Image (cartoon, grey):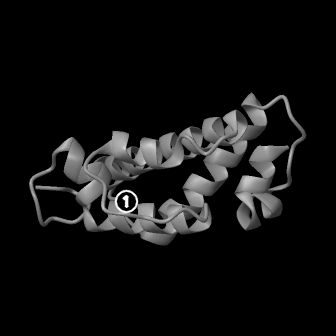
């Protein structure tokens, strides 16, 4: 069973997309990015939703943010399984924002943005 929700068998598709916790995280992240959210078929569907927006820097940043979501869901799952952690949606969303901001700062050759700017307008930061 899924360690996060306890409702379904844990598969990659369930853990990263269809688990109630993962779905809420994706919905909030898409809202934060100001992108309409539709029920995806797989992770590639999510990546495709964010591609083709016309700006390579924004696309690169969006893929990095999606990678951060997957990474943080995996870390949360392992924390619940091995460290008696908990799968809290708000904590996961904050972890995604913090890690994606740090990744962007570490990999970007453009102007940096402060964390409060990243939280408020990530797309503007990606355009710098």
Please state the horizontal and vertical placement of residue 120, each as a whole percent of the image: 75, 67
Instruction: Determine crowd level at label 1: few under 14, some 14-19, many 20+ residues with C-alpha closer than 10 A.
Output: few
* SS category of the residue bearing label 1: loop
Residue lying furthest right:
111
Quadrant including the C terminus:
top right
The residue that label 1 is drawn on is 85
Whether residue 63 sits left or right of residue 47 in the image: it is right
Please state the horizontal and vertical placement of residue 27, each as a whole percent of the image: 44, 67
| Closest to the observer, 110 or 83 | 110
The quarter of the picture where residue 48 lies is top left
| Closest to the observer, 35 or 85 | 35
Whether residue 119 sits left or right of residue 29 in the image: it is right
Please state the horizontal and vertical placement of residue 30, each as a whole percent of the image: 51, 62
Compared to residue 22, the image places residue 70 above or below, namely above
Please state the horizontal and vertical placement of residue 100, each as a whole percent of the image: 63, 46
Identify which residue is drawn at 73% across, 29% down. 107
Quadrant including the N terminus:
bottom left
For the image, the number of numbered tags is 1
The quarter of the picture where residue 94 lies is bottom right
Identify which residue is drawn at 75% across, 46% down. 126
Identify which residue is drawn at 30% across, 62% down. 39
Whether residue 76 sits left or right of residue 60 in the image: it is left
């Amino acid at each position: 069973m899924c360690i996060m929700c306890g409702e379904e068998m844990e598969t990659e598709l369930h853990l990263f997309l269809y688990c109630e916790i993962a779905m809420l995280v994706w919905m909030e992240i898409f809202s934060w990015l100001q992108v309409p959210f539709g029920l995806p078929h797989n992770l590639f569907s999510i990546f495709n939703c964010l591609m083709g927006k016309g700006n390579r820097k924004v696309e690169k940043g969006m893929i990095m943010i999606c990678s951060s979501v997957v990474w943080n869901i995996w870390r949360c799952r392992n924390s619940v399984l091995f460290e008696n952690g908990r799968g809290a949606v708000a904590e996961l969303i904050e972890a995604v924002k913090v890690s994606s901001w740090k990744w962007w700062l570490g990999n970007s050759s453009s102007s940096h943005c402060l964390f409060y700017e990243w939280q408020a307008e990530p797309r503007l930061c990606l355009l710098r």
